[in-house]
Amino acid sequence: MANYLPLIALLLFIGIILAVNFSPKARLARAQKQAEREAAELALRTQAQNLFELFSSGDGTVPNVTSDVQGVILKGGETCCALSRNAQHIVSRTKTRYVGGSQGVSIRMMKGVRYHVGSYRGHPVKEEFETIADVGAVYVTNKRFIFAGTKEVTSVPIAKIADVHLEGARVVVIVENKVNPMIVGITQPYWAPVIAAAAQRMASA
């Protein structure tokens, strides 16, 4: 009988776990949490849709969320109409690698002395890649498109914005007289179109 005691204890433990997790009360609690998550997502999606339509229409008064701006000091008369937290500042980098190189040949001349000949690095090949330079918040104001990160604050004057478009969840800001655009990745669901529409609205005002 003693040999079966661990097995009986294990079965009792499993039974308790099943009773707790699959009881009517537990199922009701899980259903309530799921309903709360779905309601929160629906509210966020509806808010984003309403703001997108407001900015896109060109009519009506834009929101004023200046009091929610953090990490950057706004200029006199500058007001913020849209923002998104946990945004990513995406930048282009260039790295160089060498192709066709050779390590050469090492010739032993005498004990403890070797002569290395014939090595060369090959020809350089430059490769461009994108990387996340910083994480922070993006703000659209009546004067600037701002990224305020933990390491940097980068902004584009609204008057210098030539175009704004979306690439998935990334807002791409084309700046006059600059080769590289300002790219911001929006991690907040449904919010990338809102930020892009807000920037377009401010730039066309």
Image: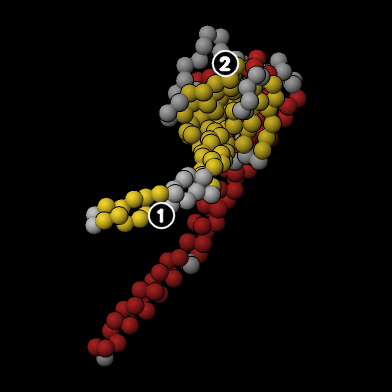
> Looking at the picture, which amino acid does disc 2 mark?
Thr
Q: Which mark is residue 105?
A: 1
> Looking at the picture, which amino acid does disc 1 mark?
Val
Residue matched to label 2: 79
Q: Residue at x 51, y 40 (%)?
A: 96
Q: Residue at x 72, y 18 (%)?
A: 204
The location of residue 179, given as percent across then percent down, is 63, 25
Alpha carbon separation for disc pair 2 and 1: 67 Å
Q: Residue at x 57, y 32 (%)?
A: 184
Crowding at dot 1, Cα within 10 Å, few <14 / some 14-19 / many 20+, comes out as: few
Q: Which mark is residue 123?
A: none
Q: Are marks 2 and 1 in contact (CB under 8 Å)?
A: no
**Vertically, is 196 above or below 1?**
above
Left or right: 175 as drawn, with respect to 151: right
**Vertically, is 57 above or below 170?**
above
The image quarter in which residue 162 lies:
top right
